[in-house]
Image (cartoon, rainbow, N blue to C red):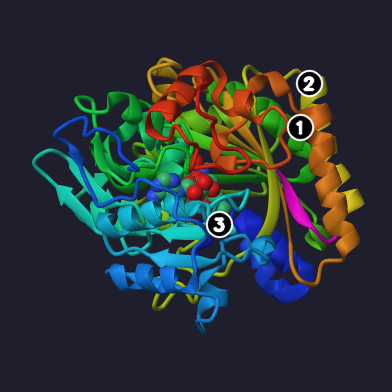
Amino acid sequence: MDPTAPINRRTLLRRGLQVGGVVAGAALVAVALEDSRHHTVTSSTTTSTTSTSTTLGPATPSDWTALAASLTGALILPSDGTYAADALLYNEKFVNLHPQAIAYCANAEDVARCVDFATAHETGLAARSGGHSYGGYSSCPGLVIDVSRLSSIVVDERTNTATVGSGAKLIDVYNAVGSHGLLLASGSCPTVGIAGITLGGGIGVLGRRYGLTSDNLRSLRLVTSDAHVVTASAEDHADLLWASRGGGGGNFGVATSFTFALHPVPELTLFTLQYPWPAAAALLEAWQHWTLTAPDELWSNCQLLTQGTYGYLAQTSGVFCGTPSALAGLLAGLERAVGSAPTYRFVGAKAYIDAMAIEAGCAGLTIAACHLAGESPGGTLSRSAYSAKSSYVDQPMDSAHVTAIVDAVQHLHTSAPTVGGGLAFDAYGGVINRVAPDATAFVHRDKLAGIQATYSWSSATPASEIDAGAQWLTWLGATVFDPRTGAYQNYIDPTLANWATAYYGTNLERLALVKKTYDPENHFAFAQSIAPAP
Ligand SMILES: Cc1cc2nc3c(=O)[nH]c(=O)nc-3n(C[C@H](O)[C@H](O)[C@H](O)COP(=O)(O)OP(=O)(O)OC[C@H]3O[C@@H](n4cnc5c(N)ncnc54)[C@H](O)[C@@H]3O)c2cc1C
């Protein structure tokens, strides 16, 4: 593993698994230190498909057989040998979800047939891309419409755009666009699907300079609840494009492809600074002021973690669009403000794909290996079990709040000593905050940082500690987090009471109107889906 690797989200989530005793201690320490029905056709960009206008009653075995026969892709039923594996999501805690069928769609027409079938038979449906939904909302008791085979990535160097199938994984997108000297601003986890992350926003290491993934979305193709394929752009179905830029996955239809604006890759410098735990409060205090005044070119995070029996970790890491020498002065300012020397310090220039692989926790792996084992040929990455809660920081926290954050990490360690987890602050600001909150559905445009609290576990973790972690998250949400700041819809949180306002704020009303237009009967429904306006 690359010793320059910062601790990324994926590593963070896997930390508890390792701490739980599955992986040898020496390896863990190394990781720790490294790192239609029938809508009227509304525009030339709408494709009509055969669709059922009446409810047909519950699907019978012969209905499922007929659906399978109608698809170019594959329909997996519980009787199929691969069903158990095909039903899995990324988060191992969702092992008990048992859909009636999983359709691996080969094209938009397959998706339309599946939507039509599910709505006609009222089976319930869920779209699935990378399967990383924190709430398990890409599965359902009915029909899972899996788009992972829609994974083509076509780069147009004349327009600096890429058209990406909705099932493409982030690492494959980075690899494809990077080979043209271009970048897409998006998240760190290599196996996250482009659909989920884009529809919910998409915060990443290049976000302060190039915006959210959804900010770079120019158009998308989507199958609506009436089984029509529409192309939403600034010219056609503009309200649907607006809603798809942060309005959350699974709400308005099944996206089949996205067209993104790309940017020429600049020089990139990565850095990681680690501090002893007693300096954790000083680091967080200094970091929040530092990131507030940082140039757009500098993105960073601050992580305060417990690694179970391997102790605590306080670190900041980030990506700078520029050279190491240009970053030096900025880092010196942070180090002065912290007031003590880091115990580990790395600063180094990296090529784009290497930088993204390091951030993904895939340093030293081939692109093929940087996929989930069993999901993709040559994939070596494992799933994990975790829970999370998110919030935001609008302005620098006072020292009492900073102390409360540090104490909260210690509280997790005390109540669940072998569990890994803690709090990670991701810098917002820059280009992200210069977009008006109502310009896209992504409303969180005045934030200093996003906060994510996570804890993860393995099969060896005592149930009492898993429960203690859940209680810790509840306690955090009620006492340490400020509920007025909102929550990130891509860290969708089934335990959040006021989720609709927290995710969408003042954009909620318009989102409900878009929902009414494209899914008036609320077929795309799950526990935290947007309801159609009355
Ligand atoms: C390890 C890890 C690291 C992460 N890192 C980041 C990060 O760096 N930045 C960040 O912003 N987020 C990050 N996330 C959060 C991530 O963006 C969300 O979990 C996202 O929703 C996952 O998308 P997916 O396609 O993989 O998941 P899925 O579970 O497949 O989908 C998520 C939601 O979108 C819906 N959906 C899926 N496909 C479609 C489609 N084709 N059309 C319409 N709706 C669809 C699903 O029904 C579900 O409601 C991370 C998550 C994990 C687990």
Which of the numbered marks, if any, corresponds to residue 281? 1
Q: Are marks 3 and 1 in contact (CB under 8 Å)?
A: no
Task: Give how far across and how far down residue 397 sits, in percent.
Answer: 71, 20
- Who's the residue at 57% across and 76% down the image? 84
230 in relation to 117, above or below: above
- Who's the residue at 23% across and 49% down the image? 49
For residue 30, which quarter of the picture?
A: bottom right
Which of the numbered marks, if any, corresponds to residue 139? 3
Q: Could you tell which of marks 2 and 1 lies nearer the N-terminus?
A: 1
Q: Ligand 1: does it lie within 8 Å of the C-beta at label 1?
A: no
Q: Are marks 2 and 1 in contact (CB under 8 Å)?
A: yes
Whether 82 is among the magenta residues is no
- Who's the residue at 49% across and 69% down the image? 60
Pointer 3 local density, CA inside 10 Å: few below 14, some 14–19, many at least 20: many
351 in relation to 245, above or below: below
Q: Could you tell which of marks 3 and 2 lies nearer the N-terminus?
A: 3
* Amino acid on which disc 2 is placed: Ser
Q: Secondary structure at mark 2?
A: helix
* Amino acid on which disc 3 is placed: Ser
**Chain part drawn in magenta:** 418-423
Pointer 1 local density, CA inside 10 Å: few below 14, some 14–19, many at least 20: many
Pointer 2 local density, CA inside 10 Å: few below 14, some 14–19, many at least 20: few
Q: Is residue 293 visible?
A: no
* CA distance separating discs 2 and 1: 8 Å
Q: Secondary structure at mark 1?
A: helix
Task: Report the side of 70 relative to 432 (left or right).
Answer: left
Task: Give how far across and how far down residue 236 sits, in percent.
Answer: 21, 28
Task: Report the side of 166 relative to 247 (left or right).
Answer: left
Whether 420 is among the magenta residues is yes
382 in relation to 115, above or below: below
Q: Ligand 1: does it lie within 8 Å of the C-beta at label 3?
A: yes
Q: Is residue 479 visible?
A: yes
